[in-house]
Amino acid sequence: MKAMVINKFGGPEVFELVDMPKPELKPGYVLVRVMASSVNPFEVKLRSGLLPEITPPFPAVLNADFSGIVIKNGENVELYRPGDEVFGFIGGLLDESGALTEYAIVDEELLCMKPNNVDFKTAALFPLVSITAYRAIMEKSNIKPNDKVLIHGAAGGVGHMAVQFAKMLNATVYATVSSDEKAEIAEHLGADYVINYKKVSVDQYVKEFTDGKGFDVVFDTIGCENLINSFKAVKPEGLVLTTNSRVSLDLTLIHHKSITFKTIYIVLPIVNNEHRYEIGNTLNEIKKLIETGDLTIYRDENEFSFSEIAKAHQYYQDGNTTAKISLINDLI
């Protein structure tokens, strides 16, 4: 079978097309024909060598987001049958199959039936960003109605999912963005107030929207140095969640304000090989919301084929998108 792989770390140009043996089934796994995937910062980091400890062995097949069709079951598979249309967060790390290939074997616990109201390429946009936002907002935040929730990067992949989940909990949502175009996205998805962080300082918007008291919950989808802004913006004894804490920072503010700080790392069930069913269970909840029309996703106007994955990564790195990038399998 054909696959797009990397044999070394580097820029987008390290992707290459190769022929590989079709993966052999094992108990609890299904063989799927991959129909679509999507671009995430996670795979950009893997390709660049920023996460060598969880990168698959070379030649590495990347990409966790996928949609496709079940072709064959391994032993002990209970949930799916050949012909089922599915989507999921299938791995693409350590020894788990990635999606940039004709066929992949997938742990059935990482899958869900595809929502019946979207096509394959739309379904493949959802898994990583929606699971991450769901885990942060719906499971880890304890948001109450009318809580003031600040979401950094609210027009990004995880951020625009988080805005929708926070509104489902009847929070008052404050969204930080970097442009008028991104402000429109956040507003359209339900943000009550939109803040252009390039024009307004943290101190200014904390004073304007909270009388200087701080927000009840801050979800930081940018992380790293922006965490300091999150610690400044949250109220004393408030909660800060982040998807990116790989940075050395002075944590004095956490101590002085008695902040609760939580990190969201959705690959943990795969890395630790524990509680993998949580991914499938979360996808089932997301599937329901997609089918009722309560959860939507922004797709970039440009889409790429699997064989154009290098161009897709370059397009993402150049900052040309404000939405998820579709990848369509042309290797089949």
Image (tube, rainbow, N blue to C red):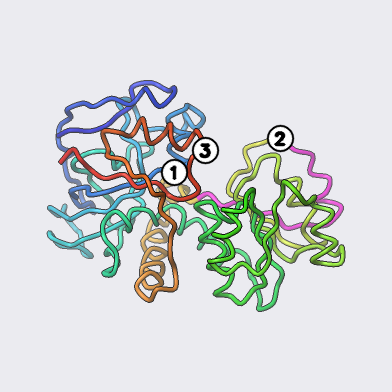
Labelled disc at residue 40: 1
Q: Say which label, 2 or 1, has the lower sequence index.
A: 1
- Look at label 1 and name its amino acid: Asn
Labelled disc at residue 248: 2
Q: Residue furthest front?
A: 180
Residue at 43%, 60% in the rendered image:
297
- The residue tagged 3 is 319
- Left or right: 162 in relation to 203: left
| Range of magenta residues | 249-265
Q: Say which label, 3 or 2, has the lower sequence index.
A: 2
Residue 74 position, x and y percent, is 16, 52
- Left or right: 231 in relation to 212: left
Q: Residues within 10 Å of mark 3 (few under 14, many from 20)?
A: few
Q: Residues within 10 Å of mark 1 (few under 14, many from 20)?
A: many
- Look at label 3 and name its amino acid: Gly
Residue at 22%, 49% in the rendered image:
35
The Cα–Cα distance between marks 2 and 1, rounded to whole angstroms, is 24 Å
Residue 15 position, x and y percent, is 33, 26
Residue 216 position, x and y percent, is 74, 66
